[in-house]
């Protein structure tokens, strides 16, 4: 069986130190993204905080602000914070039952079946999907809000 290649096998890093224009031989620009000590130069971002406090984010999926409602420059940082925090899985001794017959309720055992993505909102008594929330767009398809905004109840 053939060993799978990594993406690095397809690309080679160019080691370009300086480039001089042919029109003016005395004008040279440094094209190397590495600084003199060999480290990548740090670019200062404006308008975005360097770190985001996870404790400031709403954990309850039924109450939290959607990713697309944050400033565009902060969305990836917010996503990383939610990924780091993991899915919001509240384990209760008894979950509220639905009003419809047959009376159903959320089951804590579902967290063991779907540990990486299933979330529960006590405020809405509904199930949510963490990855879908992380990458949901504002103008999604019909019914796509069931796992991000409205929550799923059966």
Image (cartoon, helix red, strand yellow):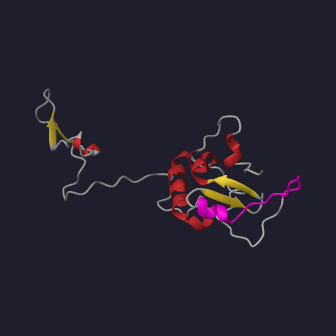
Q: Residue furthest front?
A: 1
**Residue stretch in magenta:** 98-113
**Which residue lies at the image location 69% right of the left edge and 66% below the top edge?**
108
* In the displayed structure image, the side of residue 141 where residue 122 appears, left or right: right
Q: Is residue 59 in view?
A: no
Q: In this view of the protein, which residue sits in the foreground, 55 or 130?
A: 130
Q: Is residue 56 in view?
A: yes
* In the displayed structure image, the side of residue 24 where residue 9 appears, left or right: right
Q: In this view of the protein, which residue sits in the foreground, 13 or 130?
A: 130
Percent x, y of residue 22:
13, 28
Percent x, y of residue 123:
77, 61
Above or below 25: residue 132: below
**Which residue lies at the image location 72% right of the left edge and 63% below the top edge?**
107
Q: Looking at the magenta stretch, what is its main secondary structure?
A: loop
Residue 55 drawn in magenta: no
Q: How many marks?
A: 0
**Which residue lies at the image location 86% right of the left edge and 54% below the top edge?**
102
Q: Quadrant of residue 104?
A: bottom right
Above or below 114: residue 140: above
Quadrant holding the N terminus: top left
Percent x, y of residue 10:
24, 39
Q: In this view of the protein, which residue sits in the foreground, 38 or 83?
A: 83
Percent x, y of residue 55:
60, 68
**Which residue lies at the image location 73% right of the left edge and 50% below the top edge?**
152
Q: Quadrant of residue 138?
A: top right
Q: Residue furthest left?
A: 25
Residue 112 drawn in magenta: yes
Q: Residue furthest top?
A: 23
């Amino acid at each position: 069986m053939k060993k799978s290649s990594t993406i690095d096998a397809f690309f080679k890093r160019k080691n370009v130190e300086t480039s001089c224009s042919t029109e003016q031989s005395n004008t040279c620009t440094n094209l190397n993204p590495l600084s003199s000590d060999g480290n990548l130069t740090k670019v200062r971002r404006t308008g975005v905080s360097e770190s985001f406090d996870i404790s400031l984010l709403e954990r309850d999926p039924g109450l939290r602000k959607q990713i697309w409602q944050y400033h565009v420059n902060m969305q990836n940082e917010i996503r990383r914070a939610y990924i780091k925090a993991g899915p919001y899985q509240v384990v209760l001794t008894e979950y509220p039952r639905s009003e419809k017959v047959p009376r159903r309720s959320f089951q804590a055992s579902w967290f063991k079946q779907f540990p990486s993505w299933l979330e529960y909102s006590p405020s809405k008594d509904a199930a949510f999907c963490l990855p879908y929330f992380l990458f949901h767009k504002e103008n999604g398809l019909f019914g796509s809000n069931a796992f991000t905004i409205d929550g799923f109840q059966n």
